[in-house]
Amino acid sequence: MNNRPLDKLNWGILSTARINRRIIPQIKKASRSELVGVAGRDPERTRRFASRWEIPRAFNSYEELLANPGINVVYISLPNSLHGEWVLRAGRSGKHVLCEKPLALSGTEVERMAAEARGRKLVVIEAMAYLMHPQFLRLKSFIADGLIGRVRLIRAWFRFFLPRGSNIRWSKELGGGVLWDVGCYPVSFCRAIIGAPPVEVFARQQTGPTGVDVISACQLNYSNDIIAQIDCAFSLPYGVGAEVVGEKGLLRVLNPWQPDLDGKVSDLVHVAPDDTETEISTLARDPYLCEIETLESAVLDGVPPAYNLEESRENAEVIAALYRSARTGKVVKKFY
């Protein structure tokens, strides 16, 4: 790896996945980033993708992109089961990484990534964009300032209809399932609010025809007597939201997972003990730009990311424990 100080991030993208449509415009918009190239499994499809999105170079393989010395950071939007392998390969090629959620399917995989990043002085960030957005940061500041008193209960949910078909989220082998796909948002939300992982978890699931969970409902209990209840679904009407309930009120997040992408005016609602509701608007920012700028600050300025690999590891372990609880029908207490 070239040890000269960087003044700009030169991005390569691994895969031509649909989620890239969110990240590409924001890489181009970011002041200290430049999109250099994209790689896919099918060279012709990759060339068409690069032409459509005006990406300068289409690489014939992931390996070819990682070998290019002009690229110093990669965005990985591959299927969940491939995240571990390609984050490690990117690290061994001297690249910083922004990887789609979930970062890995086990805490052990995240530990390997963290060790590789430390050894090579690289930055690896899981793409939980909402955690880097002004809405969530202001929510945390309200809680820290005591607006709702001591937190006692958290509720969070993410539900939608996912049509059957070839979507990789229906594939058990590729790390599909609703809890891995979008349940990771409520799990990470609870961890970020409380500042610690749960001490025990319990889950119930309904499984679809391909063997992946299509509905997951979970309870997470914490050592400081906070209870969290979360649910997620591929087979229910669309609904997103979160509530943090304290002894002196509650804060409701209208669109916690993709703030500012749905046209809502008010981001937060504060409910006082007398049931008075106050709408609170926060700074409007594209959440994908927030995660890009977080990586820019981490790599170029040495600013530690607000969301780190220790949290990613704990969240992966919690989700794995929830799957284990659903399989066994038992509370799981030891999973770290």
Image (spheres, rainbow, N blue to C red):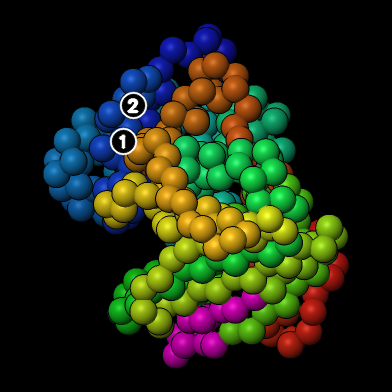
Residue 165 lies, in percent from the top left, at 30, 79
Number of numbered tags placed on the structure image: 2
Quadrant where the C terminus lies?
bottom right
Q: Find disc 1 in the rendering and name its residue.
A: 26
Residue at horizontal 73 percent and vertical 77 percent from the top: 202
Q: Is residue 286 visible?
A: yes
Q: Find disc 2 in the rendering and name its residue.
A: 30
Magenta highlight range: 206-218
Q: Is residue 295 above or below residue 169?
A: above
Q: Nearer the viewer, residue 253 or 113?
A: 253
Q: Is 209 colored magenta in this rendering?
A: yes
Residue 135 lies, in percent from the top left, at 47, 43
Q: Secondary structure at mark 1?
A: helix
Residue contact at pointers 1 and 2, CB within 8 angstroms: yes
Q: Is residue 330 left or right of residue 323?
A: right
Spatial CA span between label 1 and label 2: 6 Å
Residue at horizontal 53 percent and vertical 9 percent from the top: 4
Q: Quadrant of residue 162?
A: bottom left
Q: Which mark is residue 282?
A: none
Label 2 Cα neighbours within 10 Å, binned few <14 / some 14-19 / many ≥20: some
Residue at horizontal 54 percent and vertical 16 percent from the top: 301
> In the displayed image of the protein, which residue is found farthest to the bottom?
209
Q: Is 234 colored magenta in this rendering?
A: no
Q: Is residue 80 left or right of residue 246?
A: left
Residue 304 lies, in percent from the top left, at 63, 27
Q: Is residue 210 above or below residue 44?
A: below
Determine the main secondary structure of the stretch shown in magenta. Answer: strand
Q: Quadrant of residue 329?
A: bottom right
> In the displayed image of the protein, which residue is found farthest to the top?
4
Residue at horizontal 82 percent and vertical 63 percent from the top: 225
Label 1 Cα neighbours within 10 Å, binned few <14 / some 14-19 / many ≥20: many
